[in-house]
């Protein structure tokens, strides 16, 4: 046999995304995306690999990287080595670069120094993002340590230095400082941005801050490696791991097969809580754990905090949805904001339990490999209906307490010597509760809907009566859940009208607005959109454009173009959103969904009853009148 027959064909090179995530790439011929990119709805790009003679890299001096930075004109990428995706001109090559903690290539931006005044400015900006309220973070202590070191980061202990860089990199995403944005128009303050015209090119800010944010982020990961924060456990290391996990997610969807800093954050939080006397910061912990559960559900990754961790961090309280709903319906307490505040804990517990159930039975890695579990799907559908009802009751209370709500893009931060403003925190808290209520059930609804659609696409054509009946039940379930997800999309639009702050979208991974835009656009019947859908798309469009102020998400520019194309014939792009009725009964509840499926019940009997409940009796109006 000739020798060339024994040679295996050379494997095609891996795509950029699989290489950055360090996972096996099932490479396809040119022009065909790999399966992993198709599954994650990502642009599949394969950069040409140029073999060069290895060059010894001189060791960098960390002391020279610490006080201000400027983009290096000599480090601009060449067109041959940095392909630009064809989806949008706004997508920068550096956005699709490898994650900072896995990248071995030199940064495209050179950090020369970080001045003391700039460090002070970034610390003030950090108070405008939700991360500054994390229960493990003591921002005054970090500020005091920096002041004692004369604002020089090279004089800090290794773990504190890693935390400082992580904080500065997170704050740089919203900073209006000229050293961050570079050349171009610069607002005098974050408050000024709220008065800028609606046609402002917000994407220009995201492009201009790209180099500075990338440099700060890479320095944060470098400092974390030097301090071994995943090995040397402490409160400081735990919160640094949390911030680095967030920063890594800004470079694309988190790798569902590994979140090293996220897992270390959960492990260290668990170990710290085990040594506490009682529970600390319960009110803040359940909010952060809920955000983590919802973010993991959105991206299809594993929920890194277990049920035992939740009990350890915010208590072992059990909640009955029926009793909770009964307390929310009590109209005599509508004027008491404390009832709305106290509702966040039981609602978060129910959301976290539902997210874990969804992962274990329907959307998790193990559940996705198993045959479709109809019983689990029906039970989750019923739980989702109850969760929607609870969210509606909470939102009605907030609307009663706060009938008109004005969104501030960047609310005033917690200054060390600022006078107390008791009304501002209350209004901010009410908007945050309303945001949590809508986010809680809408995220789970979208994840459930997407998994059902994926299952339906993979189902083979039925070959017998049993398979045909199973397919009919699946189609019915999909139609019912599609109705729920459209209502949830309308609620997402309303939540965009009453945001606590813009960083609640840009600095939390819980909302992927471009997916909601696609759901609402797909809901058009006969090419026409309902008024509720148009209003929701208008609100989502406005916030999507504003998010480009912080960074350029590759999925956002195409979503903006799709929404504008759909709204342009209606001449509704610049119209204000529809007003909200505080007591509007805008949630439709199917009685069928409020009853948990009984495993002893015959699925075909359930299917027949469901068809009548969902579509009416056979024969339409005549059959109904005959009955």
Image (tube, helix red, strand yellow):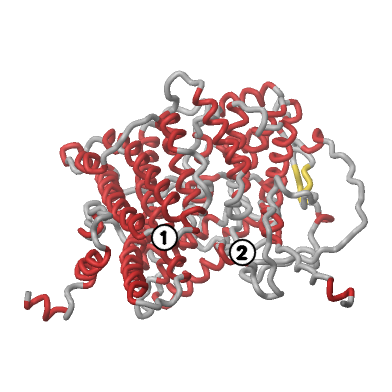
The secondary element bearing badge 2 is classed as: helix
| Whether residue 192 is visible | no
Q: Is residue 291 shown left or right of residue 348? A: right
Q: Position of residue 379 (x, y in %)?
A: 31, 54
Labelled disc at residue 9? none
Residue at which label 2 appears = 37
Left or right for 471, reference 113 = left
Instruction: Identify the residue at image location x=40%, y=43%.
Output: 352
Q: Position of residue 107 (x, y in %)?
A: 77, 49
488 left or right, relative to 226: left
Label 2: how many residues lie within 10 Å, few (<14), some (14-19) or many (20+)? some
> Residue 517 is drawn in which quadrant?
bottom left
Question: Of discs 1 and 2, which sits in the foreground?
Answer: 2
Q: Nearer the viewer, residue 557 or 371?
A: 371
Coordinates of residue 22 in the picture (x, y in percent): 69, 53
Horizontal arrangement in the rendering, residue 624 relative to residue 596 (left or right): left
Q: Where, quadrant-wise, is the C terminus in this rendering?
A: bottom left
Label total for image:
2
Contact (CB < 8 A) between labels 1 and 2?
A: no
Q: Which residue occupies 44% across, 49% down?
A: 360
Q: Which residue is mark 1?
A: 539
Front residue of 459 and 452:
459
- The residue furthest left is 626
Q: Please indicate, yes or no, whether residue 515 appears anywhere in the rendered image.
A: yes
Q: Earlier in the sequence, mark 1 or mark 2?
A: 2
Residue lying at the far front in this picture: please name it: 1
Above or below for 8 versus 274: below
- Secondary element at image label 1: helix
Identify the residue shown where x is 36% and y is 39%. 349
């Amino acid at each position: 046999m000739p020798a060339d027959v024994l040679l295996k064909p050379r494997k095609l090179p891996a795509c950029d995304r699989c290489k950055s995530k360090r996972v096996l790439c099932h490479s396809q011929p040119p022009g065909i995306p790999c399966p992993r990119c198709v599954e994650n709805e990502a642009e599949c790009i394969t950069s040409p690999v140029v073999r060069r003679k290895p060059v010894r890299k001189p060791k960098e001096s960390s002391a020279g990287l610490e006080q201000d930075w400027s983009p290096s004109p000599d480090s601009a990428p060449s067109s041959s080595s940095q392909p630009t995706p064809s989806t949008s001109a706004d997508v920068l090559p550096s956005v699709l670069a490898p994650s900072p903690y896995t990248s071995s290539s030199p940064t495209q931006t050179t950090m020369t120094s970080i001045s003391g005044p700039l460090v002070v400015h970034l610390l003030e900006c950090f108070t405008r993002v939700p991360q500054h309220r994390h229960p493990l973070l003591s921002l005054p202590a970090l500020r005091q340590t920096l002041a004692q070191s004369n604002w020089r980061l090279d004089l800090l202990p290794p773990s504190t230095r890693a935390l400082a860089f992580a904080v500065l990199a997170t704050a740089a995403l919203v900073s209006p400082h000229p050293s961050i944005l570079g050349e171009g128009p610069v607002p005098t303050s974050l408050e000024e941005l709220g008065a800028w015209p609606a046609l402002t090119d917000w994407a220009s800010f995201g492009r201009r801050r790209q180099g500075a944010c990338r440099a700060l982020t890479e320095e944060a990961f470098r400092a974390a490696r030097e301090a071994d924060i995943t090995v040397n456990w402490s409160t400081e290391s735990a919160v640094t791991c949390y911030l680095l996990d967030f920063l890594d997610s800004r470079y694309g969807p988190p790798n569902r097969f590994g979140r090293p800093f996220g897992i270390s954050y959960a492990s260290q939080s668990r170990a710290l809580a085990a040594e506490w006397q009682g529970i600390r910061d319960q009110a803040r912990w359940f909010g952060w754990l809920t955000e983590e559960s919802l973010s993991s559900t959105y991206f299809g990754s594993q929920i890194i905090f277990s049920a035992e961790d939740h009990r350890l961090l915010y208590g072992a309280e059990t909640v009955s949805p029926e009793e909770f709903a009964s307390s929310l319906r009590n109209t005599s307490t509508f004027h008491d904001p404390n009832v709305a505040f106290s509702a966040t804990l039981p609602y978060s517990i129910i959301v976290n339990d539902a997210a874990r159930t969804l992962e274990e039975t329907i959307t998790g890695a193990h559940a996705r490999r198993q045959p479709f579990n109809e019983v689990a799907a029906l039970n989750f559908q019923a739980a989702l209906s109850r969760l929607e009802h609870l969210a509606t009751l909470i939102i009605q209370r907030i609307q009663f307490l706060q009938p008109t709500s004005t969104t501030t893009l960047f609310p005033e931060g917690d200054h060390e010597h600022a006078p107390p403003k008791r009304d501002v925190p209350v209004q901010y808290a009410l908007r945050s509760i309303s945001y949590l209520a809508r986010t809680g059930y809408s995220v789970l609804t979208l994840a459930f809907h997407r998994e059902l659609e994926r299952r339906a696409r993979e189902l083979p054509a039925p070959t017998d009566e049993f398979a045909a009946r199973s397919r009919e039940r699946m189609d019915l379930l999909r139609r019912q859940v599609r109705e729920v997800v459209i209502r949830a999309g309308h609620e997402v639009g309303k939540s965009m009208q009453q945001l606590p702050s813009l960083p609640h979208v840009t600095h939390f991974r819980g909302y992927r607005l471009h997916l909601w835009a696609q759901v609402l656009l797909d809901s058009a019947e006969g090419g026409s959109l309902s008024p509720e859908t148009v209003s929701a798309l208008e609100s989502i469009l406005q916030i999507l454009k504003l998010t480009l102020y912080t960074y350029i998400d590759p999925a956002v520019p195409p979503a903006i173009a799709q929404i504008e194309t759909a709204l342009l014939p209606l001449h509704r792009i610049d119209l204000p959103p529809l007003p909200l009725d505080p007591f509007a009964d805008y949630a439709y509840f199917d009685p069928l969904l409020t009853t948990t499926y009984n495993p002893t019940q015959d699925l075909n009997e359930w299917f027949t009853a469901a068809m009548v409940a969902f579509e009416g009796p056979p024969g339409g109006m005549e059959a109904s009148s005959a009955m």
